[in-house]
Amino acid sequence: MRRRDKLRTKKEITNVAGEEFLKQGFLEASTIRIAERAEVAHGTIFFHFPTKADLIIACLYERLGKLAIKLDLRSRKTTNIRYLCRIFLDGIEKNSAFYSRLIKDLPLLPIEIQRMVFASLSAFSVHFVKVIKKAQDTGKVRKFQPKIAVFYLFGMVNYLYSYKQLLGTDKLRRKDKEEIIDFFINSLKK
Amino acid sequence: MQDQQSQKSCIVCGMPLLKDEDYPEGADQNSTDWCKHCGSKDGLKSYSEAVTGMSGFMQHTQGMSEEEAQKAAKQVIDNCPAVKSGRMKKDE
């Protein structure tokens, strides 16, 4: 019973924190306000999440953890980079408000928080690196450091979601997304 | 990514332990809560090996600089369940 209460409290804090991060931004969101809204003592936040970085990462996983697992499982069975790109773009789109806010605020956060969040984002990039490496080994893709492709892919996605409103990112049609993916894939080919 | 829910994940790097191939070779999955990158069937890697390994991983997958990857890896590992519970000693 106590373990279930702890898990429930943790989930409630994560949900509320996610909403506050969206509304106030990652820098401005206050753990005091999160505690009030989650109806817990302020100290309870730090019991479950010793630092703000832990709370941000918990929210990131809450919203995007399933996407990371989906990329993981698919990347084991395929060398189809296009397919992974589609999964990634669709997953980010479903959480576009959160992702937009995160990538806009991340450079403003203390470097210690940036490091932890960046480290967590390896949970996405590793699967692209894996699949690109497999495609290189089978001769489908030219030889280069796979992380360079990650720079381009994430750079492109982050651009789309940093300027979501200006670019109308949420209104991109399937055809537009496929063209974006085509461009990326063609840049990898021999 | 550290798991916050019931999904089993590595107590060092947070990698979800989804399939047999994620565990160290020969490990008893019921009693092993680390991945093949963070230990063997006989136990966890040392703290310095874990930091070095994770630093390399971040450089390779995220393009982080060596200096920042080392700092990030140390931060992640210092906060991981394995270190916090004392199962991985920081001064090893």
Image (cartoon, coloured by chain):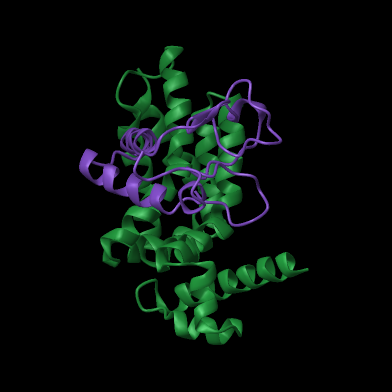
From the top left corner, tell me how far across and down residue B82 is, in percent. Answer: 50, 46
Residue at 59% x, 43% y is A69
Residue at 52% x, 63% y is A59
Q: Quadrant of residue A36?
A: bottom right
Residue B25 or residue A73, whichever sits in front: B25
Residue B47 or residue A155, whichever sits in front: B47
Q: Is residue A149 left or right of residue A130?
A: left
Residue A86 or residue A23, whichever sits in front: A23
In the displayed structure, would residue A12 be above or below residue A167?
below
From the top left corner, tell me how far across and down residue A55 is, in percent. Answer: 48, 66
From the top left corner, tell me how far across and down residue B59 is, in percent. Answer: 30, 36
* Palette colour of chain B: purple
Residue extending farthest to the right is A1
Residue A153 or residue A121, whichever sits in front: A121
Residue at 41% x, 34% y is B46
What letter labels the chain drawn in green? A
Q: Is residue B9 left or right of residue B67?
A: right
Residue at 53% x, 23% y is A79
User: How many numbered discs?
Assistant: 0
